[in-house]
Amino acid sequence: MSRAAEETNRRMLRARDAMDGAYAQPLDVPALARIAHVSPAHFTRTFRATFGETPHRYLQRRRVERAMFLLRETDRRVTDICFEVGFASPGTFSRTFRDIVGRSPRQYRKQAVAADVPTCFTRAWTRPGS
């Protein structure tokens, strides 16, 4: 792997790590591109080429993964979870959740059972497809 490719990967990982750490915050492509020290258009193309999905879709999936955990492990209202994980409206949250998981947040909560195993295993077994 060339030095340029390594540096590009490092920059994309830096931006992805920022997304993982601040998934509930409003993040936009220009801000993420600044973290990676590239232009917004180049960031979007390179992120997709590196990780196989757009930055927006990656962020949505991370938010849904966190929501899945909260739906399984807490009794909090779906609307509260929606806002906590970074969605601006319950409608967008429900539609995105259904697109990624295949069922509504309420249906997921009814069918999900909190397993007495380490969280890392649960996350791997229930990770939504991209």
Image (spheres, rainbow, N blue to C red):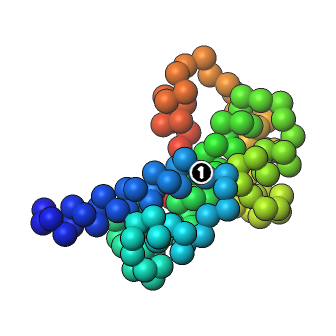
Residue 87: x, y in percent?
74, 58
Q: Secondary structure at mark 1?
A: loop
Vertically, is 71 above or below 36? above
Vertical comparison of 33 with 109: above or below? below
Judge left or right: residue 18 versus residue 83.
left
Q: Quadrant of the N terminus?
A: bottom left
Judging depth in this view, the residue of 30 and 82 nearest the camera is: 30
Report the label total.
1
Query: Residue 4 versus residue 37: which sits nearer the camera?
Result: 37
- Quadrant of residue 77 in the image? top right
Residue 105 seen in this snapshot:
no
- x, y percentage for residue 25? 67, 56
Amino acid type for the residue under numbered disc 1: Ala
| Residue 33 screen position, x and y as percent | 46, 71
Q: Is residue 99 left or right of residue 87?
A: left
Q: Is residue 77 visible?
A: yes
Give the residue displayed 21% in from the left and 67% down from the top. 5
Which residue is found at the position 29% from the left and 61% from the top?
Answer: 9
**Residue shown at 56% from the left, 64% from the top:** 57
Vertical placement of residue 97 versus 21, above or below: below
Outermost residue, top side: 116
* Residue at point 55%, 27% (across, down): 119
Pointer 1 residue = 22
